[in-house]
C-alpha cells in the first residue's frame, strides 16, 4: 500500500515525510495508536482521530475481504485468564465478580487489538485471541508475546482500579489451523480449529501467576527478541 498516497487522500499529506522517516508501511497502519501518532508529530487531536478512523476502516475492509470458505493458516493462539477466579467466586457476590471479569476481559481485548490480534471469544474469565487470522503479519508470534507482556504489566493498574490483588497467566502456541466460519444458520462465528488452540489452552494451566508460557514453536520465532526460561518437556493432557 502506498502510505504517502493514503495520507494525501485523507488531506494529511504533511505527515508523509514523518511516516517515511519512521518506516511506517502499509502493514503497520492498522496497528497505529494515538501515542504512535504523537511520536510521529501529529499534534492535532482532530488529525489523530481522522487517521485512527481511517486505519480502522482499512482493517475492517481487509477482514471483510477474507474468504468465507475455510482456509489453512499458521497462527499464534493466546489464552489468558485470571488466576484464582474460581476461588474468588466463592468470596464475592455475582455482581462484583462480573465487574472484575468484565474489566479484565475489556483490558485484555484492548491490548490484543492494539498489537494487531483478533479477539476470538470469551470463555468465562478467559479470552482467546489469534494472531495471523483473518489478518496476518510477518511477526504474529512476536505480536502475541508482546500482547502477553503488555497484559502482565497492566495487572498492577487493574488491581488498583478494582481494589484487589489480581494476576493473570497466559499460554501461547503456534501452529497450522483451519480458519473460517463455524456454526449453522442461527449463528456462525469466525474462529480457528487445530492443535495450536488446544496447546495454548493447556499452557495456561502450566503458567503460574504473572507468567506467560509459550510453546517451543513460538520460542523459535521470538528467541532473538525475547528473554525466557526453558522449562523442559511437559506432559499435557491430551497432547
Image: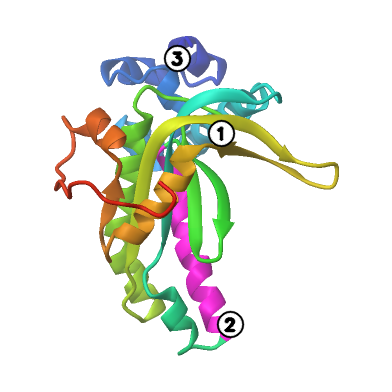
Q: Where is residue 12? Give x, y as percent.
A: 48, 21
Say which residue label 1 marks: 56
Could you tell whether 120 is left or right of 237 in the image? Answer: right
* Image position of 88 (left or right of 23): right
Q: Is residue 114 magenta?
A: yes
Q: Are marks 1 and 2 in contact (CB under 8 Å)?
A: no
Per the image, label 1 sits on a secondary structure element best described as helix
Give 59 or 191, whichever is nearer the viewer: 191
The earlier-in-sequence mark between 3 and 1 is 3
* Residue at position x 52%, y 37% in the image: 194
- Judging by the rendered image, the residue that carries numbered circle 3 is 3
For numbered disc 3, what is the local secondary structure? helix
Between the residue at mark 3 and the residue at mark 1, the CA separation in whole angstroms equals 15 Å
Task: Tell me how the rendering is colored.
Answer: rainbow
The part of the chain drawn in magenta is: 94-115
User: Of helix, strand and loop, which one carries label 2?
Assistant: helix
* Residue located beneath label 2 in the image: 95
Amino acid at each position: 500500500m502506498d502510505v504517502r498516497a493514503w495520507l494525501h487522500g485523507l488531506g494529511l499529506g504533511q505527515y508523509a515525510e514523518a511516516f517515511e522517516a519512521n518506516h511506517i508501511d502499509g502493514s503497520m497502519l492498522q496497528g497505529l495508536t494515538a501515542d504512535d501518532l504523537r511520536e510521529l508529530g501529529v499534534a492535532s487531536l482532530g488529525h489523530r482521530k481522522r487517521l485512527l478512523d481511517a486505519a480502522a476502516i482499512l482493517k475492517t475492509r481487509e477482514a471483510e475481504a477474507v474468504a468465507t470458505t475455510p482456509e489453512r493458516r499458521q497462527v499464534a493462539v493466546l489464552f489468558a485468564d485470571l488466576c484464582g477466579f474460581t476461588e474468588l467466586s466463592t468470596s464475592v457476590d455475582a455482581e462484583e465478580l462480573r465487574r472484575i471479569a468484565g474489566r479484565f476481559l475489556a483490558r485484555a481485548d484492548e491490548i490484543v487489538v492494539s498489537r494487531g490480534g483478533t479477539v476470538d471469544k470469551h470463555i468465562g474469565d478467559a479470552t482467546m485471541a489469534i494472531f495471523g487470522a483473518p489478518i496476518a503479519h510477518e511477526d504474529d508470534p512476536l505480536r502475541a508475546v508482546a500482547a502477553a507482556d503488555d497484559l502482565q504489566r497492566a495487572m498492577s493498574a487493574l488491581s488498583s482500579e478494582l481494589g484487589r490483588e489480581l494476576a493473570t497467566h497466559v499460554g501461547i502456541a503456534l501452529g497450522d489451523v483451519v480458519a473460517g466460519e463455524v456454526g449453522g444458520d442461527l449463528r456462525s462465528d469466525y474462529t480457528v480449529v487445530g492443535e495450536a488452540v488446544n496447546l495454548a489452552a493447556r499452557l495456561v494451566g502450566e503458567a503460574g501467576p504473572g507468567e506467560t508460557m509459550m510453546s517451543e514453536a513460538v520460542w523459535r520465532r521470538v528467541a532473538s527478541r525475547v528473554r525466557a526460561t526453558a522449562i523442559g518437556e511437559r506432559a499435557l493432557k491430551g497432547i
